[in-house]
Image (tube, rainbow, N blue to C red):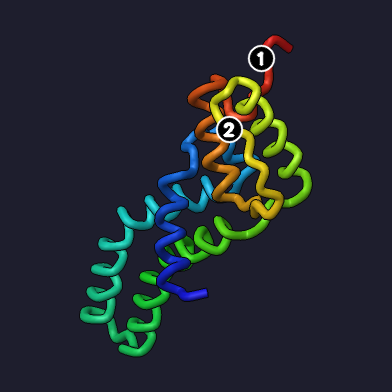
Amino acid sequence: MNLVKIFKQGQTYMDICPKDKGLSYSFPELKIISYIKMAKKILPPIIIGLILWQYYLPAQLVVTIITILFTLSLPIQGILWLGYRSQSPLPLNLVDNYNRIKLQLIEKKILSPNKNPNEKLTFESLMKLINISKIHLGNYFGQDNDN
């Protein structure tokens, strides 16, 4: 796949993912998204500090440049990982949850039954379904809270 396309998918996936802390135990994407947002805030002072380090201390220019490039690449690496993750197939344990949530949404006539057997179940489709479930069923996995 094209890296630009994966990068754009990663940015889109950041917007799609629900921001509930309860889901962060099950989905590492939510932690990666929070790390990317934190990195966007703290990277400019770190880069300025590295440049000042180069200027005032006898550090080698190559070491400083490599450190700055690595620091700048961290959020990009996270976004690329999210892009790959969004298009990766669901593991079997999440396919059951996906099907159960989808059946509940079909029963409530929120979704129309899709007869497409070639539908690719990805993490992106799961996150979209989880968002719809939160809006219409009141919780993410459509479970009863009576227990």
* Disc 2: which residue: 112
Q: Which mark is residue 145?
A: 1
Whole-angstrom CA distance, mark 1 to mark 2, is 26 Å
Disc 1 marks a residue whose amino acid type is Asn
Rendering coords of residue 119 (x, y %): 65, 52
**Pointer 1 local density, CA inside 10 Å: few below 14, some 14–19, many at least 20:** few
Query: Residue shown at 33%/83% (left/top)?
Result: 65
Badge count: 2
Work out which quarter of the rendered image holds the C terminus and state it. top right
Rendering coords of residue 12 (x, y %): 42, 53
Rendering coords of residue 29 (x, y %): 54, 50
Q: Which mark is residue 11?
A: none
Query: Residue shown at 69%/10% (left/top)?
Result: 146
Rendering coords of residue 18 (x, y %): 49, 38
Disc 2 marks a residue whose amino acid type is Ser
Give the side of residue 65 with respect to residue 139, left or right.
Answer: left
**In the rendered image, which quarter is residue 98 located in?**
top right
Give the side of residue 42 with respect to residue 141, left or right.
Answer: left
Closer to the eye: label 1 or 2:
2
**Pointer 2 local density, CA inside 10 Å: few below 14, some 14–19, many at least 20:** few
